[in-house]
Amino acid sequence: MDFEKIKNFIKTQKIPAYRLAQIRSAVYEKGITSWDKATNLPLDLRELLKKNFKILSVKPVLIQASKLDKVFKALLELEDGLKIESVLMKPGKTWSICVSSQVGCPLGCAFCATGKMGFKRNLTTEEICDQALFWSDFLKEKKLGERVSNVVFMGMGEPLLNYQNVVAAVKELSDSDYLGIGQRHISISTSGVADRFINLAQDLPQVNLALSLHNADNEERSKLMPINKKYNLDIVKEKLEEYLARTSREVFLEYTVIDGENNGLHHLRKLGKWISEIKDNYLLHVNLIACNKAVGKAVETDEFVVRKFSQALTKMHIKNSIRKSLGSDISAACGQLAINNGRKK
Ligand code: SF4
């Protein structure tokens, strides 16, 4: 829902301003999904809103629930018929959502199902925010208790290639008029669009930044993540240093362990060297993720292999933790989002 448009509409139609608070309460607090159910509003206003605004710009086509974890995945249809996926999960005590920022992705990382779809278009600010609103309503409808507390931009697409809309969406999501999710509870994960790091430091200094690294060898990383040809590890390092100097915020380095591909001694050494040469590297934290079965050559990595890699990093005094992948039975885990309409991959 584009609340800004509704605000302007209320103003231009000379409707009393207190109606806005009622609309806000109906949508964001009560979680109504159709204007007919907004019974706190007079009938004529409900009809007017129905004629001019949709509450949600995304329509659920399929919702899958994981049998392994507290994870739900939704296939959402956009107004032009294109589809995206969005994930709700509860890794700890609170609910988090993983949102998409593009339909498909132009970057074609070797281990990622989304990358194989190609790129269709950027999502609008409204379409990004409405994923949060959709899950917020879902939690209320299913009586699952709490609200959406965390948002990660780790779904389909590279968020920093849809920069303006992502920044506007973060501002809206954290606005107390909207869902009021604190910016420190919002994370943006990038494959390394390094030119944007400094913009992020200026525009959203409170938001968490995660960099998908996956390999610290330039040649090998380029094969895994073609974006490395444009922003190689030297460029990423330089821009990361600027970001760290400006924000003093912890940055997460995501490292999907692909057994036999990026977990050898040579990879450890390269990773250690790359991190040790970064100024303010005490602010860096490596998140290790076991590779899921997605597409291409990648095979599922055993947890034991990831633990071994983690121990080796710890010996090198590199801060790290192992991140559990959730929802792999419904292809909702990292690198698995792609439009398959619920069919098994
Ligand atoms: S990992 Fe991210 S950046 Fe790479 S292809 Fe997949 S969605 Fe795009």
Image (tube, rainbow, N blue to C red):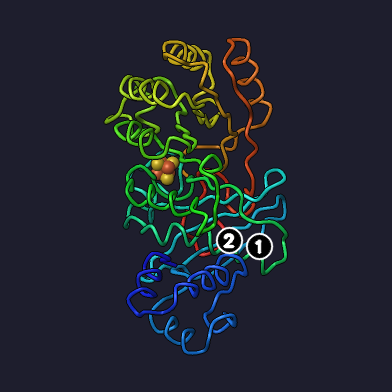
Q: Give above or below for 8 relative to 151.
A: below
Residue situated in front as seen by the camera: 51 or 235: 51
Q: Quadrant of residue 54?
A: bottom left
What's the distance in space between the residues labelled 2 and 1, CA to CA?
A: 6 Å
Judged from the image, the secondary structure of the residue bearing numbered disc 1 is helix
Whether disc 1's CB lies below 8 Å from ligand 1 is answered no
Pinpoint residue 64: horizontal percent, then vertical percent.
62, 62
Residue position marked by numbered label 2 in the rendering: 135
Q: Amino acid at mark 2?
A: Trp
Pinpoint residue 105: horizontal percent, then vertical percent.
36, 49
Residue situated in front as seen by the camera: 250 or 46: 46
Q: What numbered label is drawn on residue 26?
A: none
Farthest-out residue, bottom: 44
Horizontal relation, residue 53 to residue 311: left or right: left
Query: Image point 50% across, 59% down: which residue?
Result: 177
Query: Image point 62% across, 48% down: which residue?
Result: 328
Ligand 1 image-quadrant field: top left
Pinpoint residue 98: horizontal percent, then vertical percent.
53, 50
Residue situated in front as seen by the camera: 234 or 44: 44
Residue position marked by numbered label 1 in the rendering: 139
Q: Give above or below for 320 relative to 23.
A: above
Query: Image point 32% across, 57% down: which residue?
Result: 120
Horizontal relation, residue 193 to residue 3: left or right: left
